[in-house]
Amino acid sequence: MRQTQITINVELDENHVPEKMTWNAQDGGVENQETKATMISVWDEKAMEALRIDLWTKDMPVDQMKMFLHQIFVSLGHTYQRATGEDDVAEKIQEFAEDFAFMSKIK
């Protein structure tokens, strides 16, 4: 069986707040690429719930966080459509993403 790894390295300050993050993805050709934010979700089948890790560096600009979240909402719509084939629900997620962009003043 073939295995691969995706890793995230987090440097913390004295208050355990992320100061710097880098990530690596062997198969994606990513090596020590710096990032300001990451969100990881995994499915716990036994508990039937999503487990999450949301991290961002203390110097992540708010306007970039808004753009990051908007792009995640757009991506969720695409993922939902591919996973379920339910175009109507996926369209509602996309509408929410556009409403979010308007309300947060990024578009």
Image (cartoon, grey):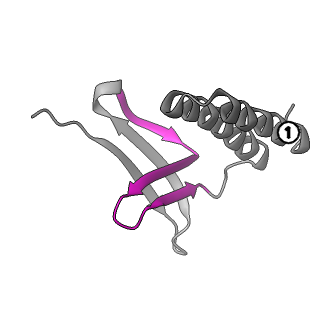
Range of the magenta residues?
A: 30-57
Where residue 9 sits in the image (x, y, percent)? Answer: 39, 51
Q: Does the magenta stretch include residue 47?
A: yes
x 51%, y 74%: residue: 14
| Disc 1, SS | helix
Circle 1 residue: 99
Where residue 26 sits in the image (x, y, percent)? Answer: 28, 31
Q: Nearer the viewer, residue 37 or 77?
A: 77
Q: Which amino acid does label 1 sit on?
A: Asp
- Residue 93 placement: quadrant: top right
Q: Which of 66 and 58 is in front in this view?
A: 66
x 78%, y 40%: residue: 96
- Residue 47 placement: quadrant: bottom left
Name the dominant secondary structure of the magenta segment: strand
Q: Nearer the viewer, residue 68 or 8?
A: 68
Quadrant of the image containing the N terminus: top left
> Image check: 67 left or right of 38?
right
Q: Is residue 87 magenta?
A: no
Where residue 6 sits in the image (x, y, percent)? Answer: 33, 41
Looking at the image, residue 16 lies above or below residue 96: below
x 35%, y 25%: residue: 28
